[in-house]
Amino acid sequence: MSSATVTVSNIGGSRLTLGFDRFDRLDLDRHLAVHGKLRTPVLEDVVRMAEQVDMRGRGGAGFPFARKLTAVAARVVHPSADQENLLPGERGGSRRPGADAVVVVNGAEGEPGSGKDKVLLCRAPHLVLDGAQIAATALGTQRIVVAVEDDQAARSVRAAITERRMPARVVRLVERFISGESGAVIRAINGETPIPPGVKVRAAESGVDGCPTLLSNTETFAQLAVLTSLGPDLYASAGTEDEPGTTLLTIGKTRVVEVPYGTPLRTVLEHCDVRPGPGVLAGGYHGMWLSPQGANRAVLSRKGMQAVGATVGAGIILPLAEGTCPLGEVTRIASYLAAQSAGQCGPCRLGLPDIVRALNALSDGSGTVADVKRAAGIGRGRGACSHPDGTARFVVSAMDAFAADIDAHRMGGACGLPTFGVLPLPVPDGSEGRIAIDWSRCDGHGLCAYLVPELIQLDRYGFPVVLGTDIPVWMERDVARAVSMCPALALRVTTGIPRSPARGS
């Protein structure tokens, strides 16, 4: 999705999107004219401001920014026992930031339904870099890395860095759903396989090159720049008392809207001339479904979304269009999520395919909602990253939001609606592969199910039942082995071009 194809607007006034009505992109001169000169307060003042407005990360987890910043600062400060090495005014047992911290702008937007961060990087790159510079200066470092997936965003940020003569670098990430997970971003920057680490390691303790690392989402740094420019009191003039400020939302992939916290979701949908349809997905593909009634009651804040059983998450709002099969759409996205896993833990390797199988059975009337919830519950809290949990949350919430459609499937094996594929997925590039069976050859040896149980299981007669998903990158070698070892030469891969190992995980 190009930023030029996204319509940007605001409700109640613009902050992050200030100047967008006049300029397609704010270069340095335009940025200074719109936002003013950069101010870099000391660490204590940055922390105080962030705490005063309870600024949270905008990448989905909503972690308090001040806590993240102080966690990094605690790892890079130098004890002040050697008073002779302290700067004037620091003597008397105070601490000062060291120079080994790294600031990382996480511009990965592997979520197909999101476009807000790309809009910021392409149209207001200096606002994002201002926020990164404020954080870096507070931590006493010049090491700034901007991690992006998109060519257009990378070009925009590089041009902005050149304009500022800034000692920062841009790192390109592989375009995958899990690319934006913090551990995967750190590994990519370090030149390692870009997947979440099997053991959780806090970036504040050991991140880029093993250094304490402050890693936050693109919008978070832009919000820090706005907070520093406006000051806490003026910043808090928008939003609610508990959640001051504005946030960016991606609506249906083609609209990005800046709204104050506390805005009713129905107001945003009306502003975008979008109907809630049979349901609204809030928070993206790791988010939760809302019924039309829930969407009508929802308020865009942590407290307001929790009241209807949802979350703002990464600011992705996807209304489901009328006329398409809701259960078919959910199954389609679950299949995509299963193929996007890193394949390094059981909940992803086996748990996510089981969810897809349970959804397929529910779709044809042979399964139950209990089967889906059971499959979704197996991997909760046990994965190497949040991917199994997020996928389970997405699927389980659909069981309640689309209960009427599911009942139609259970009674008649179908609801009578086609699956149009209206929920966004990446455009195929020809490298995607799927397993196919030549039934004129298959004798039911069952070897394929032994070699790739994630994708093939046997029916009660011993014949293979193939999971209808793309072959995950991490399984390509196993699938090739299964194809070559099939005694009847019945196994096939229907694909375009093979992928290089560099894209694997």
Image: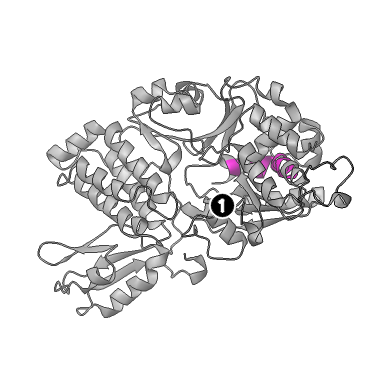
Would you identify the image quadrant in which residue 297 lies?
top left
Residue drawn 24% across the image and 71% down it: 450
Q: Which residues are magenta?
A: 117-133
Position in image of residue 291 (x %, y %): 33, 28
The reply, left or right, for residue 268 in relation to residue 368 is: right
Q: Is 140 in front, or is 183?
A: 140
**Which secondary structure dominates the residues rendered in magenta?**
helix
Q: Is 142 in front, or is 453?
A: 142
Q: Amino acid at mark 1?
A: Arg
- The verdict on residue 260 being magenta is no
The reply, left or right, for residue 453 in relation to residue 251 is: left
Residue where numbered disc 1 is placed: 202
- The verdict on residue 119 being magenta is yes
**SS of the residue under disc 1:** loop
Would you identify the image quadrant in which residue 90 lies?
top right
Classify 10 Å Cα crowding around label 1: few (below 14), some (14-19), many (20 and above). some
Position in image of residue 230 (x %, y %): 73, 27
Position in image of residue 66 (x %, y %): 64, 37
The reply, left or right, for residue 181 in relation to residue 51 is: left
Q: Is 62 in front, or is 16?
A: 62
The reply, left or right, for residue 149 in relation to residue 270 is: right
